[in-house]
Amino acid sequence: MGLQQFYLATFGLILMQGLAWSAYTVNVASQSTLVNPGDKYVAYCNIPGQGALDIIQNLKVKWFHNGQALTSLCEFLSSDLTQKYSCKVLSPQPNNISLELAVLEVQKADAGNLTCKVYEKVKENEKYVRDEVVAMKSVPIQVREPIKSMMFRFDQKKDHYLTLENNEALHQVEVLPGKYAPSCEVMGSMPKANVMIMMGDKMMQGRMVDMENKMGTQFVAEETEFKGNSQVNVMCSAEVDGLPESKKERTYQVVVRQRDPKFKCTNTSAIVNNKRHMITCEVYDVEGISCNKILWKKGDTGEDYSPGNYNNINVACREVDNSKIETTLEILQVTAEHFKTPFRVIYNDPLSQTKEYQLSIPQEKPDSEENKHSSSAVALQTSLVFLFSIVLTVML
C-alpha cells in the first residue's frame, strides 16, 4: 500500500483524533518465531497511542531485516524487495496503527531478526533537520531444520551404535541377560528434536542430558532388566516439532540368550604305548551351538587344540543338531605323560562365561605284566613244595 492509499484510509479518523502528546512506544510480534523452509513468515508492528495524523506529521516507521532497511511505512525502498517481501497497513483504529510485513518463501539464510523502528521528525526553526529513533523492537525468525545426525547406543560398555547412515531395518544385537541403559543423541536440528526410546510398544523412562556447546539432545534411558531367552525391539525415535517428515527412527532387535552348556564325556582307561586312545564329549542344551567355539586344552601348559590334526593328537567335532555337538580327542600313542596332566574341553561363547569340563585319563596295567607276576608266584610255590617232600623222605 502506497502513502496515498494510507492517507485515504486514515483521513476519516483524523477529524476524530486530538493532537494530545504521549510517549512513543512500539510493539512487534509474529504468529510464530519458527517457520518451515518455503513458508511465509508474518510479523506485526503496532504503534499504540498514535493516530494516523501523528504518524504522518511527526513520525517515520521503517522495517529492517537483519539490518537491511526495507520500507518507509509500507513503501519498499527498492522494487526488487517486492519479490521477497510484502507489506500492508492494517485497518487503522483510533490511536492504534499496525503494519504487517511478510517474508515470502523463507529459506535458511533468512533466519535472524525483523526490526520495526520508529523515528521522530525533529524540527528546528519549523524545518525538519533530522530523524531520531524513539522506539525500536525486534522479533526473531527461526527456520526449522531437520535432524543432521543420530547416535543410538544400546550397551554403554560397547563402542557400537546406530547412525543415520544405517538403514531403518532391524539391526540384530545379541547380549547377555542383565540391566542396560540405552542412549540416543540427536544433533543439528532447529529447534532441538524431541527424543524418546521405545522398548517394544512402551516408552522407556529416562532423562535428558545437557550437551555443552552442542545443538542437540541426548536421552538416556533408565537401567532396565533384559531377561534371558527373550527378544525385543528397542527403537530411538526423534522428531522436530512442526517440521513435516522430520521423524528419524533406528531400531535394535535385541536377542537375549542365556548360554549354559552341559557336558557328557566318556573316557576309558589307557595303557602306556597304547595306540589310538579316544575321549568323546557331548556338549548340548545350547540353541545355535557351533563347533567353532570348541577348544581342548592340555593342563596349564598352554597347549590348545581346536578341531584339527596335531602332533600325536587329533581333534574332531560334528554338529549333531541345533543344540548339540560331539567332539573327540584322539591320542595316537599314549605316553606316561598323558596320565599326569588332565585335559579340559572348553565351550567358549562371547555371549556367556567360558564353560569347561575337566577329565583325566586313568592308567591301566597291562595284562602281560600281571600274568608275569602270577606265574612267578606259582613257580616259587611249586619249588618249595617239592623241596619239602625230599626233606621229609630223607628223614623217614
Image (cartoon, grey):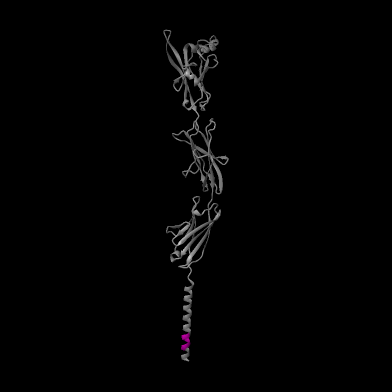
Instruction: Please tell me whether residue 157 is drawn above or below residue 121 in the rendered image.
Output: below
Q: Please, which residue is most extreme toward the right here? A: 201
**x, y (%) of residue 295?**
48, 56
Q: Nearer the viewer, residue 245 or 315?
A: 315
Say if residue 99 shows up in the picture.
no
Q: Which residues are magenta?
A: 386-391
Count the labels in the image.
0
What secondary structure characterizes most of the magenta part?
A: helix
Instruction: Please tell me whether residue 231 is drawn above or below residue 393 in the rendered image.
Output: above
Residue 170 colored in magenta in the image: no
In the image: residue 301, left or right of residue 36 = left
**x, y (%) of residue 255?**
54, 46
Say if residue 131 shows up in the picture.
yes
Q: Nearer the viewer, residue 125 or 38?
A: 38
**x, y (%) of residue 178?**
52, 47
Q: Please, which residue is most extreme toward the front here? A: 309
**x, y (%) of residue 166?**
50, 40
Q: Please, which residue is most extreme toward the bottom here? A: 396
Q: In which quadrant of the rendered view does residue 120 lie?
A: top left
Q: In which quadrant of the rendered view does residue 13 lie?
A: top right
Instruction: Please tell me whether residue 221 is drawn above or below residue 260 in the rendered image.
Output: above
